[in-house]
Image (cartoon, grey):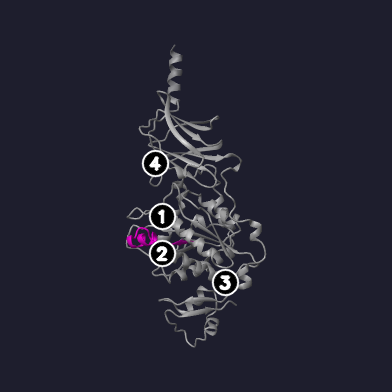
């Protein structure tokens, strides 16, 4: 009898506790690859998940848990989910059922609190037979033909679970940067010899590594990530352009911004349990100096074009360790279009006319770079026209020559300048040899 009591005591001591959790919220997002359902929990809990057929559905059992309101979701983001309901198979279990339109492969995981979120149970639903995969944006073979278009991959930051920064008037970064990215695609597509592809076309989250992998998949000649960040000082304003740094950030602001952006995977709901810790360092080690140099050259051109719109946050392109810029073979830059934390710039970010002007300026910078350095076999390489630069306040002839990687002598000669004095508003022809 005494031995039995001791065994019971030992089993009770080492038993795995079951934590109760209240379900506080429910959301659904759909991207081209999957439908994601998210349950907000007030604490970590165990759960059981299984599927049933005829009709297809997913069942989630949460022990010792409670739910005191109906679960709802936005129909436009529903994807494969046809409905959601809940009940109690016994007095100690909360059961949530997702009714599906078709059978799906399931992946689920728990996320710890981060950003503005608490604990989350994530259920990813992948339709079988690739039913919810979208058509490819462009056949790779067509991109490799002679006189092909230059391909620019445009990445709208954040999305889905990750809203990014939020302005004083509740403007969300993920919404305005998607609008700018779509405008940028239209502007680039309108240029002869250029085509743009979007890493995301709607309100869903893409892991940071997957963003630049999409650029590589489509054989992109350039990757541009669009953002609109916030700062604790609401008076801070102006656009910025960043490239990857292999040494360190060019400013404290750049370091803080990169740390914030690199944490997006935690907010967006990406499980890190199956990631190789060496991957990031290997990718960075593979980065060739030519890719880094090209990134800086196109960033200089875009930055110079953005200066024609007005104030920039800094006087030069900045450097920081952004994960999204770590493609080893695609020149990459990140554009902070404006500070969403600045009330005036928050209003501009929502203005379609301002979005078009910004897209036009970025396109001009990209186009100028490719007319200076066209990839072999492209239409631009065969048909490029002279690159022109409009002088803005603060420009010097030496700085312009440095930005476009041309000699000061050739810049003077082609523009028939006898001195280094230049007039604001004047247009300079940039030599292409």
> What element does badge 4 sit on?
loop
Q: Which residue is drawn at 55% across and 53% down?
A: 281
Q: Residues within 10 Å of mark 3 (few under 14, many from 20)?
A: some
Q: Residue at x 54, y 79 (%)?
A: 407
According to the picture, the residue beneath numbered tag 4 turns out to be: 118
Q: Quadrant of residue 90?
A: top left
The span picked out in magenta is 334-353
**First-in-chain label (3 vs 4):** 4
According to the picture, the residue beneath numbered tag 2 turns out to be: 353
Q: Which dot, 2 or 3, sits closer to the camera?
A: 2
Circles 3 and 4 in contact, beta carbons < 8 Å: no
How far apart in space, not on screen, are marks 3 and 4 (Cα)?
49 Å
* Residue 342 within the segment the image draws in magenta: yes
Q: Which of 249 and 410 is in front in this view?
A: 410
Q: Can residue 289 be seen?
A: no
Relative vertical location of residue 25 with respect to residue 257 in this rendering, above or below:
above
Residue furthest bottom as drawn: 418
Numbered tag placed on residue 371 in the rendering: 3
Numbered tag placed on residue 103 in the rendering: none
Q: Which of 188 and 156 is in front in this view?
A: 188
Numbered tag placed on residue 173 in the rendering: 1
């Amino acid at each position: 009898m005494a031995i039995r009591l001791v065994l019971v005591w030992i089993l009770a001591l080492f038993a795995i506790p079951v934590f109760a959790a209240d379900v506080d919220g429910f959301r659904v997002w759909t991207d081209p690859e999957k439908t994601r359902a998210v349950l907000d929990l007030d604490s970590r809990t165990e759960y059981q998940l299984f599927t049933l057929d005829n009709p297809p559905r997913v069942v989630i059992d949460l022990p010792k848990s409670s739910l005191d309101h109906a679960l709802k979701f936005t129909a436009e983001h529903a994807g494969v989910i046809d409905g959601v309901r809940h009940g109690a198979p016994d007095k100690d279990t909360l059961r949530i059922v997702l009714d599906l339109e078709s059978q799906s492969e399931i992946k689920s995981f728990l996320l710890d609190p981060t950003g503005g979120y608490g604990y989350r149970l994530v259920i990813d639903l992948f339709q079988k037979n690739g039913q919810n995969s979208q058509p490819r944006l462009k056949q790779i073979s067509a991109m490799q033909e002679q006189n092909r278009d230059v391909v620019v991959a445009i990445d709208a930051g954040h999305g889905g679970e990750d809203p990014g920064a939020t302005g004083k008037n509740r403007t969300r970064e993920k919404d305005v940067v998607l609008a700018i990215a779509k405008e940028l695609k239209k502007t680039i597509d309108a240029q002869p010899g250029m085509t743009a592809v979007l890493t995301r076309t709607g309100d869903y989250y893409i892991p940071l590594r997957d963003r630049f992998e999409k650029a590589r998949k489509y054989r992109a000649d350039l990757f541009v990530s669009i953002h609109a960040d916030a700062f604790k000082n609401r008076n801070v304003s102006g656009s910025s352009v960043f490239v990857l740094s292999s040494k360190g950030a060019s400013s404290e602001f750049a370091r803080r911004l990169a740390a914030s952006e690199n944490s997006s995977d935690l907010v967006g709901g990406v499980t890190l349990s199956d990631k190789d810790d060496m991957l990031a360092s290997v990718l960075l080690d593979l980065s060739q100096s030519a890719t880094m140099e090209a990134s800086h050259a196109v960033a200089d051109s875009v930055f110079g074009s953005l200066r024609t719109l007005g104030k920039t946050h800094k006087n030069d392109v900045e450097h920081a360790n952004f994960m999204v810029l770590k493609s080893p073979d695609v020149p990459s830059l990140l554009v902070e279009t404006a500070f969403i934390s600045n009330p005036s710039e928050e209003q501009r970010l929502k203005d379609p006319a301002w979005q078009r002007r910004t897209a036009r300026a970025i396109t001009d910078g990209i186009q100028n770079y490719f007319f200076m350095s066209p990839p072999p076999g492209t239409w631009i390489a065969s048909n490029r026209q002279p690159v022109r630069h409009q002088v803005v306040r603060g420009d010097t002839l030496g700085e312009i020559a440095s930005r476009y990687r041309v000699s000061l002598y050739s810049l003077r000669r082609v523009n028939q300048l006898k001195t280094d004095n230049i007039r604001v508003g004047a247009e300079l022809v940039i030599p292409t040899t």
